Amino acid sequence: MLIVNGDGPVLRLTLDRPEVRNAFNDELIAALTQSFEDLASQVRAVVLDGSGPAFCAGGDLQWMQKASSYTEEQNYADALKLAKLFEAMATSHAVIIARVHGPAFGGGCGLVAASDIAIASSEAVFAFSEVRLGLIPATISPFVLRKIGHGHARALFTTGEAFDAERALRIGLVHELTTADSLDHAVERKLKAILAAGPKAVASSKELAMSDPLSLEAAARLLAKARSSEEGKEGVSAFLERRPASFKVER
């Protein structure tokens, strides 16, 4: 269902339902949500990937068929669980890297959008495919709109058409393309950068990027707080003294 592997400050979460292309069901949603909500404070980065040829095919058809018999209120409760998964990712203190090696459809695109960094193989394929089933990409929309904007979302939400990794890069859904053979190397480069930085500064910078623009006063106050923090003082001292900062973790 979900493979969890810890490696010090790095946690790897692998969707492990290859027989259904790693599609969501209520159990997988619950397992993922708990993993993000219960992240240990020492975890600084999470790599999210999938078993088999697909990253995530969206909703499991049997799960969705069961939901079709629910009342509207039951469906609301069920959909809210999925929305809370994406919110748990976005508000996590750790940097989440989506390692997209294959198709990402529907909610799979939501995982990509809710991640902080998305690195995709050039063979990956994407689709906001909900409309093909008479559904809408509602729970993923807050995170997708932040990534690709309203214009691209209107075109892709309303057609459900599949698009390649080049287009995903162009519209900002993913941040980097690489060959399948180089995907792990690209992820490792990002991990090294994250682990070389101050963990509190990284968490605050993630929160900053997710927020509305700050007032001048609030921005100045936030920087002042960082400068006067122990982590900030250590980082500046290490730079001036040409030594590794104490918070740097070697990979």
Image: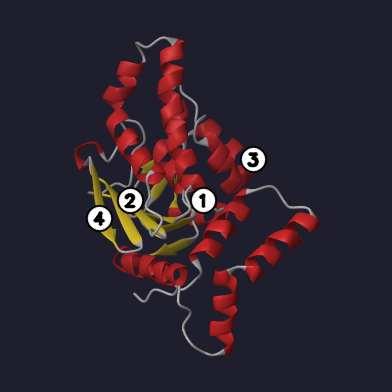
> What element does badge 2 sit on?
loop
Q: Nearer the viewer, residue 145 or 47?
A: 47
* Separation (CA) of disc 3 from disc 2: 25 Å
Q: Quadrant of the N terminus?
A: top left
* Separation (CA) of disc 2 from disc 4: 21 Å
* Crowd around label 3: few <14 · some 14–19 · many ≥20 (10 Å): some
> What element does badge 3 sit on?
helix
Can residue 50 be seen in the rendering of this structure?
Answer: yes
Identify which residue is drawn at 53% across, 58% down: 203
Residue found at the very far right of the displayed protein? 216
Q: Earlier in the sequence, mark 2 or mark 4?
A: 4
Identify which residue is drawn at 39% across, 45% down: 36
> Where residue 150 is drawn, which disc sits there?
3
* Separation (CA) of disc 1 from disc 3: 13 Å
Q: Mark 1 — residue?
A: 173
* Separation (CA) of disc 3 from disc 4: 36 Å
Q: Earlier in the sequence, mark 1 or mark 4?
A: 4
Residue 107 left/right relative to 24: right
- Tell me the kind of residue under disc 4: Asn
- Tell me the kind of residue under disc 1: Leu
Q: Mark 2 — residue?
A: 102
Identify which residue is drawn at 50% across, 59% down: 175
Q: Earlier in the sequence, mark 1 or mark 3?
A: 3
* Separation (CA) of disc 1 from disc 4: 26 Å
State whether residue 52 is above or below residue 248. above
- Tell me the kind of residue under disc 3: His
State whether residue 10 is above or below residue 56. below
Residue 123, position as x, y percentages in the image: 35, 56
Residue 204, position as x, y percentages in the image: 58, 57
* Crowd around label 1: few <14 · some 14–19 · many ≥20 (10 Å): many
Q: Quadrant of residue 21?
A: top left
